[in-house]
Image: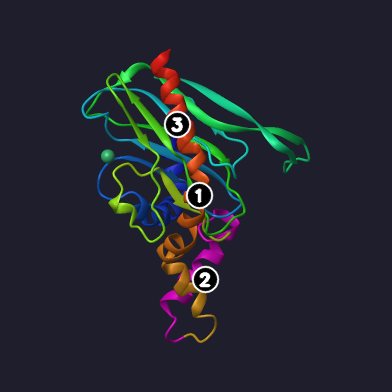
Amino acid sequence: MSIRTFARLCALPAATAAVALSLAAPASAHVTATPSTAAAGAYTVVTFSVGHGCEGSPTTRIEIQVPESVLSVTPTRNPYYDVEKTMVDLDDPVTDAHGNEVTERVASIVYTADTPLPEGQRDTFELSFQLPDAEGDVLAFPTVQTCQEGETGWVEVPAEGQDVDELDSPAPAFEILPAGEDAHGSSDEASDESAGSAEQASTDDDGAGEPAEAATPEAGWAALGWAGLAAGLLGLGAGGVALARTRTSA
Ligand SMILES: [Cu+2]
């Protein structure tokens, strides 16, 4: 399915995601993640956008680190890049939705350019996977952008109480929404209902509290998501440093 087809199918959900994303990825280009749907447990395609090089230098490689709560990822191929999966063994094997035992997970996806991405042009990379059933969690994908000269680690996450706008190189991220919140097809009616009751909260006396909360996802994002995430990412950051060293010495 092409990006364009997806955009047409997901016009409404994409708008919802864009609102949430604007909190994580302010005006500047950076590297951003836009999910086709962010509903807990849903299958999604996340588009990573790379808007510029490293201080003017063309981009040669994009490494996207996959959060631990996501076991399996399918990258969309891109004609200008070789794509590679890096796997790691799980400490404890788990059973997937099809009843198969899973002993390893995708740690990262690496796109290596055949032709470097020129400064002044953008590119996108898509990953398809099932979202964890973890409403309110923030999924962050620390991303290392390597250029002909230099590299940028888009790996920062806000400290507790910190505004993501204050970060120089925020990791692309988005918040997992309640199941059905921006889901497709069968859940459309539920979405419409909740949107309707939010607007009519003053005249409607049933469940006014929940729609109001849904209308301001940033509150949950700031209070819950980032705090736990920061701890989890310390390990990934260290991995990125080790990786950079390996490359330098190679
Ligand atoms: Cu930028």
Callout 3 crowding tier (Cα within 10 Å): few <14, some 14–19, many ≥20 = some
Residue 37 visible from this viewpoint = no
Q: Which residues are magenta?
A: 180-203
Looking at the rendered structure, the kind of residue marked 3 is: Gly
Q: In the depicted view, which residue is nearer to us: 199 or 136?
A: 136
Q: Quadrant of residue 78?
A: top left
Question: Could you tell me how far apart the alpha carbons at marks 1 and 2 are, in whole angstroms?
Answer: 37 Å
Looking at the rendered structure, the kind of residue marked 1 is: Ala
Q: Earlier in the sequence, mark 3 or mark 1?
A: 1
- Name the residue at 45% across, 37% down: 237
The residue carrying mark 3 is 240
Q: In the depicted view, which residue is nearer to us: 211 or 105?
A: 105
Looking at the rendered structure, the kind of residue marked 2 is: Glu
Q: Does the residue at mark 1 contact the one at mark 2 (Cβ under 8 Å)? A: no
Q: In the depicted view, which residue is nearer to us: 150 or 30?
A: 150
State the image coordinates of residue 232 (x, y, percent, origin top left): 52, 46
State the image coordinates of residue 189 (x, y, percent, origin top left): 55, 65
Q: Earlier in the sequence, mark 2 or mark 3?
A: 2
Helix, strand or loop status at disc 2: helix
State the image coordinates of residue 140 (x, y, percent, origin top left): 47, 45
Task: Identify whether 207 is placed above or below 108.
Answer: below
Is 68 situated left or right of 173 in this image?
right
State the image coordinates of residue 201 (x, y, percent, origin top left): 44, 81
Task: Identify whether 158 is placed above or below 65.
Answer: below
The residue carrying mark 1 is 231
Magenta-drawn stretch contains 57: no
- Name the residue at 28% across, 52% down: 166
Asked if disc 1 is less than 8 Å from ligand 1, the answer is no
Q: Nearer the viewer, mark 1 or mark 2?
A: 1
The residue carrying mark 2 is 193
Residue 164 visible from this viewpoint = yes
Helix, strand or loop status at disc 1: helix
